[in-house]
Amino acid sequence: MPPRKQVRKNNVFGRAPRREDAKIAILFLLFHKTIAKLADSFVRLATEFFRLDSADEAERQPDFIEIHSHAMPIHYRRHGRARNYVLRLHANKTVVVTVPRQGTKKFARQFVTSRKSWLEKQWRILEARKLPPQDLRPGMEILLHGRAVVLEVHPRGAAWELRAGPERTLLPNPDGNLRPALERHLRAAAKAFLVQRAQELAGRHRSVIRRVVIRNQKSRWGSCSCQGTISLNWRLIQLPEQVRDYIIIHELMHLRQLNHSPQFWAEVAEACPGYRAAEEWLKLNSGQVGF
Ligand SMILES: [Zn+2]
């Protein structure tokens, strides 16, 4: 028998190799590699899991952060697919921080501490949501265009007129809570005013808005969609002019950068040099708005 034929018979299939055999061998190798990869990532995940959980006793002690004189527990969640540290304040008043695969608990704790003012703001929003909106009566003050204005009710013909600074609206009767009629009126006034102001500012800052929507949101002043729609909270008409314009400009700059990257903030600073003072005002006074 020629030696060459002998060699061909000595392969794993015990016969002459065929094209199919090569395919099977490649598939087998691929399968083998996939299994090895899976096992490898499983081992890595398990190691990381236990590294977080079997940390020394000190690390496993419950950890708290003080927000508005309340000790809030911090929960650390390691997430294999997370790329960044992510912080959340849950409605049950616990802080949850997601730790990326390569992250450390020490850094996660520093991250939580560095975001304390953000947590305080979220806390105030949660608290505000729990309270029913306060009833409004004649003689009470609301904020309008950054100024406190007194609510007044005057007879007008057979009906009554509610006055808030330059704003006027008719009331069927002078008694009871003025809030529903006032909010209805201010929302309509805000729509006309804010749509025009947004278009003016867009023109000034060479931006193109496709649509401006006026909303009634509880916890945000504005938002921007990648389709060029800007949503604004009607309560913006309560804010001082510079603060209101800053929020509109902030959303306009999101038409260029749909993120909060350093480039985004550079655009904001150029278009609105006083934006830090506006941010500061919002931090201190947001609670006043919403009446
Ligand atoms: Zn933004």
Image (cartoon, grey):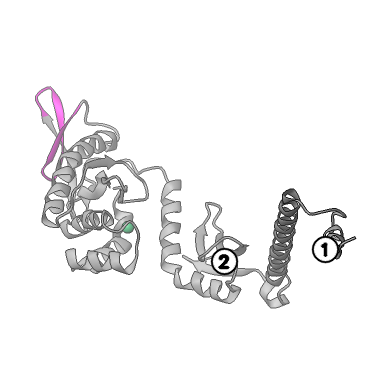
- The residue beneath circle 1 is 4
User: Image check: 203 left or right of 215?
Assistant: left
* Amino acid carrying mark 2 in the image: Pro
The mark that comes first in sequence, 1 or 2, is 1
Gap in angstroms between the C-alphas marked 1 and 2: 58 Å
In the image, 192 versus 266, the foreground residue is: 266
Q: Quadrant of ligand 1?
A: bottom left
Say if 188 sits above or below 13 in the image: above
The residue drawn where x is 86% and y is 62% is: 2
Give the residue at the far right of this rendering.
Answer: 1
Q: Is mark 2 on a helix, strand or loop?
A: strand
Query: How packed is label 2: few (under 14 Cα within 10 Å), some, or many (20 or more)?
Result: some
Residue 125 on image: x %, y %: 41, 53
Residue 21 on image: x %, y %: 76, 52
Asked where in the image residue 71 lies, by quadrant, the reply is bottom right
Range covered by the magenta-colored residues: 156-171
Is residue 157 rendered magenta in the image?
Answer: yes
Query: How packed is label 1: few (under 14 Cα within 10 Å), some, or many (20 or more)?
Result: few
